Image: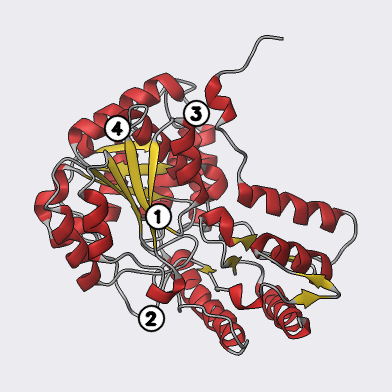
Amino acid sequence: MPDFSSRMDRAKPSAIMAVAEKAKALKAAGKDIISFSIGVPNFLPGDHVYAAARDALSHDSGQYGSNRGAPALIEAFLKHIAEIGLTGYTAKNVATGIGAKHVIYNLCEALLDEGDTIAFPTPYWTSYVDIAEILNAKIDLLPCPASQHYKMSPAQLDAALAKKPRVFLFNNPSNPTGMVYSKDEISALADVIAKYPDTWIITDDIYNRMIFDGNGYHNFVHARPELKDRVIFIDSLSKTYGMPGWRVGFMAGPESVANAVTTMNSNHITNLPEITTAAAIAALSGPQDVPNAKVREFQEKRDLVMAVLDAVPGVVCPKPEGAFYVFPDISAYYGKSHEGKVIQNDIEFCSALLESKGVACVPGSAFGEPNAMRISYTCPTPQLAPGMERIKAFFAEMQ
């Protein structure tokens, strides 16, 4: 058999999906499983989204669409981002993709040559490393542990950008931590970015509508409008609208970058499907009652999860202000045993938790932080409190 390309040696399956598949297998085998693993919102969009898809299906043209994205979809997206203060963009500044992950992959293909450096904070979303490694880029990690609330300092960013990476990738609100940068924090980071004009900035901010406690969303271009010529904003329907399987992602940024992503689309996907496009337009332009209600629900779920974790001795968990994750530092329990087995690290902890209590969480090492684990609290509400009680019991049983 002929050999695979060398890049396949660097490609890895998703660590998150591996946990989710193991939980599914145990459930199929009859075990009582509560999954806090995969980051799916676990709600469906409003009826108007399905009505738009059905209508589009009945009038399907069967033709190719735009590599950039349908004009009506781009117009709906521009109005959508204007609501969060990202104004002054036109259709020439926008491109679409098969989900935000695809857009980020296209951007990295367009902006990074082999051996170029991409920098981003740790903890990070798992795909950042996966994509960079497939492209054979160098990775500069900026450690941001629980002791600094999983947030990057201006000094850290300054030191990283002084090394002139080709790309700096930023995620706010954060997956896996749920942390949200304040207006002042974003402004301080933007001041640093302004000093280093040779680095592209990607802001992967797909949770920008899922922010709690009355806080707002802030972007570097809000603080420094002149950064618009190299800041690329990423958004998606997946989390806000409960549409992860519909696979619709967007970017807004410099015209040259949007053109590059459009060119990549012409070679990768050609266009988004017509029915998906109609559903996406309806989601962005139609009633927002479902996503607004879910933000309130997720804030309540966050409070329930935090109440349990705050009561566990030794666990350190900065309070998340967005998305639907908590990321507790559990390292105080390493070296202790459960049911006679010594737990040495996050992987052994999550494995024992799944086997003993039937609760699936993702080890923090998947996100570059082996002292923690990620809890995604989007499960059906009746499962949340029992699942957290199982976690609490697991901690209590460790010696």
Q: Which residue is mark 3?
A: 60
Q: CA distance from mark 1 to mark 4?
A: 20 Å
Q: Residue placed at 47% from the left, 44% from the top?
A: 129
Q: Quadrant of the N terminus?
A: top right
> Which class describes the residues within 10 Å of circle 1: few (<14), some (14-19), or many (20+)?
many
> Which class describes the residues within 10 Å of circle 2: few (<14), some (14-19), or many (20+)?
few
Earlier in the chain: of badge 1 and badge 4, it is 4
Q: Closer to the camera: disc 4 or disc 2?
A: 4
Q: Residue placed at 27% from the left, 42% from the top?
A: 165
Earlier in the chain: of badge 3 and badge 1, it is 3
Q: Secondary structure at mark 3?
A: loop
Residue 213 on image: x %, y %? 38, 81
Q: Which residue is mark 1?
A: 206
Q: Against 185, is 69 above or below?
A: above
> Which class describes the residues within 10 Å of circle 3: few (<14), some (14-19), or many (20+)?
few
Q: CA distance from mark 4 to mark 2?
A: 36 Å
Left or right: residue 245 compared with residue 104: right
Q: Amino acid at mark 1?
A: Ile
Q: Amino acid at mark 4?
A: Leu
Left or right: residue 101 compared with residue 386: left
Q: Quadrant of residue 312?
A: bottom right
Residue 47 on image: x %, y %? 53, 56
Query: Residue 213: which disc?
Result: 2
Q: Against 379, is 194 above or below?
A: above
Earlier in the chain: of badge 4 and badge 2, it is 4
Q: How is the image coloured?
A: secondary structure
Tell me if label 4 and label 2 are in contact, CB under 8 Å.
no
Q: CA distance from mark 3 to mark 1?
A: 29 Å
Looking at this view, name the residue that lies furthest to the front: 335
Q: Closer to the camera: disc 3 or disc 1?
A: 1
User: Quick one: 72 or 171, which is closer to the camera?
Assistant: 171
Q: CA distance from mark 2 to mark 3?
A: 43 Å
